[in-house]
Amino acid sequence: MRETHRLEYQPALDGVRALAVLAVLLFHAGTPGFSGGYLGVSVFFTLSGYLITSLLLREHDTSGAVDFRAFYGRRMRRLIPASVATVAAVVVITTITDVFDGVVALRAQVVGALLQVSNWVLLAGDTSYQDLLAQGSGVVSPLEHFWSLAIEEQFYWLWPPLVLLLLTRVRARRSRVRVVGAVTIVAMAAAPVIAHIWGPDAAYWATPARLGEILVGAFLAFVLTDASLPRHIAVLAPLSLVALAVAVVTFPASSGPAYEGFLPLVAVVSGGLIVGLQRDSLLRRALSTRPFVAVGMISYGIYLVHWPVFVIVDADRTGLTEPTLTILRLLITGAIAIASYFLLERPIRLRRGVTFRATAGAAAVASLAVIAVALIVIPAG
């Protein structure tokens, strides 16, 4: 039996977000068995490509157009308040304590985080991903993890106009799929080339090297629109999840495929998970349960705050050992993320009657204000 797929909210994908962010947190905590937990970021990339493109296609399908002002207004209200608050908190902590005194180029990273170019700031500063693994006090920047958010935000700015151009110039659905498929293949092939020419850091940080992972999700949005999916396609979900779990356990932390440009292949597996979850299954029902969905809904806030928390709440300051230290870090991260979601993110996101101009103006003023304070209070270097 086949089922026609419609682009609509899928709670199981929030469950996937929950698993992805948990993998990242346990990796950053140095938990044994999660040496490849950074692959959770790749899963996020592919999910984002799928979900954002699905939103664009759904809007175009219902209205015949894409309201860019409304789209970007929603994106800004969704992403900027919590990110500005996180960076502002880091600036305040830097001002009143000596927690981040040993961090190199923190001012530049504040600017990079708020201007959505953090990954390029890290590359320009010859920062390697291995530096992120050295969790010594005064060594690690509390804002290094903004690199992945920068890549996603750069994609958000570039992709919607290209989608609309494709939808208006190419009428046939199959032709659209072929075009996006070709672009995706080129982007995936570019990753190992970038790794070979510019090295492993560029393969991890540079936007062109990671676009293939996002475009896999975007391609699936085009493929799955009104697609007739057989019931047995659901088997892809558990197979893909097992494959991702094996990769998380076996991929080395500081070498291997991730630094050689082969992360787009992980995106293909993530894509298999997305496709498999389009049909009903035990796994889809499990990932759609309230605990998974709840964590998935606040996963953005969890990702934002977890790294500053991990840097501050370390073994030296607390005197704790594992697993108590990791449990404490997770509890603090969760509490802050929940507060952020209900007190900051959700009220702003759901506020009605806010124009694009007001949203953009508020975002610019808040970001520039934090940058100005950072340039004053954080020493250069």
Image (cartoon, helix red, strand yellow):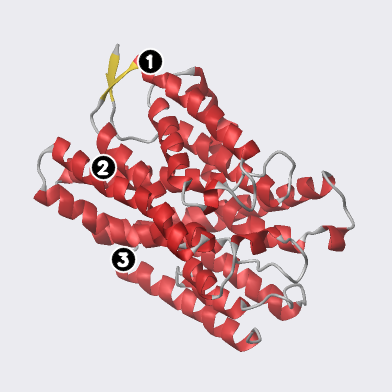
State the count of labels. 3
| Residue in the image at 77% along x and 48% along y | 326
Indicate the quadrant containing the N terminus: top left, top right, bottom left or bottom right.
top left
| Residue in the image at 59% along x and 80% along y | 107
Tell whether 328 sits left or right of 296: right
Could you say which disc has been placed on residue 181 in the image?
Answer: 2
The residue lying toward the viewer, choosing from 251 and 143, is 251
**Which residue corresponds to mark 1?**
232
Amino acid under disc 2: Gly
- Could you give the CA–CA distance between mark 2 and mark 3, rounded to whole angstroms? 32 Å
Tell whether 253 sits left or right of 366: right
Whether residue 211 is situated above or below residue 15 in the rendered picture: below
Tell whether 182 sits left or right of 375: left
| Residue in the image at 86% along x and 62% along y | 316
Rendering coords of residue 310 (x, y %): 72, 57
Mark 2 / mark 3, whichever is N-terminal: 2
For label 1, count other residues whose C-alpha is less than 10 Å away and answer few (under 14), some (14-19) or many (20+): few
What kind of element bears circle 3?
A: helix
Could you say which disc has been placed on residue 356 in the image?
Answer: 3
What kind of element bears circle 1?
A: helix
